[in-house]
Amino acid sequence: MLTDEDLVQEIQSGSQAAMEVLVKRHYSSIYSYIYRKIGDRHTAYDLTQEVFMKMMQSLGAYRNNGKFANWLMKIAVNHCLDYYRSKHYKQNHTQTELDANVSDDKSNVWDLFHIQYQREKAKQAVLLLPEHQRDVIILNFYHDLKVKEIADMTDTNESTVKSRIKAGISKLKQILLAGDDGCEKRKQI
């Protein structure tokens, strides 16, 4: 099986097949990061496509000095930041439903509803975090990236990433413990 770096070399030589393999290999990871960050399935799909277009345009600048997946994730992180700064986001800021793919046939319907409700609460709580904390929480807990990798992607130092993770967890705890009675507390956070 070819490494990402081998595929990049083949793409630079003009291989369409190598490009398809590389996109298929990383598509779900990039899409899931963007979806968790943005919260809208359709917008996440569009932004994911744009990230891969940026990847193709930037392959000439790729230097094999780290993991390709981290380089690609950095493009996704920066593209999400660009999206949040865009007029489109500011004019059409909305949140949509969570895509709960629960398929445990042995669970009863109430358990499935409860699981979906808990996931929705967690998703909404993450979306309420300030952007800098949301980024590090998503990258650390959903994508299992190390503090150093997150620091490299977000152009911050490791101690800042650690403090953002700690503060983000603390705010998530406040939001989730506040429950339905804590709507006023959520607005303050």
Image (spheres, grey):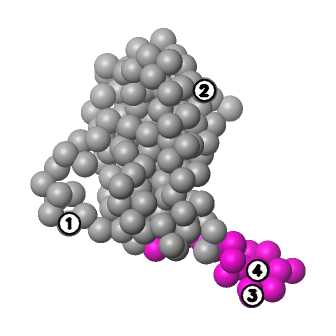
Badge 4 vs badge 1, beta-carbon distance below 8 Å: no
Residue drawn where x is 43% and y is 68% of the image: 183
Give yes or no for residue 103 being in the magenta stretch.
yes
Image position, residue 63 (x, y; %): 41, 14
Comparing marks 4 and 1, which lies closer to the viewer? 4
For marks 4 and 1, give the CA distance: 34 Å
Residue wearing tag 1 = 92
For disc 3, the neighbor class at 10 Å (few under 14, some 14 to 19, many from 20) is: few
Q: Which numbered tag is attached to residue 109?
A: 3
Q: Quadrant of residue 134?
A: top left
The span picked out in magenta is 97-116
Residue wearing tag 2 = 146
Q: What amino acid is at disc 3?
A: Val
Badge 2 vs badge 1, beta-carbon distance below 8 Å: no
Q: Which numbered tag is attached to residue 111?
A: 4
Residue drawn where x is 35% and y is 27% of the image: 59
Q: What amino acid is at disc 4?
A: Asp
Give yes or no for residue 90 being in the magenta stretch.
no
Residue drawn where x is 76% and y is 80% of the image: 111
- Which one is earlier in the sequence, the residue at label 4 or at label 1? 1
Badge 3 vs badge 4, beta-carbon distance below 8 Å: yes
Residue drawn where x is 23% and y is 42% of the image: 82
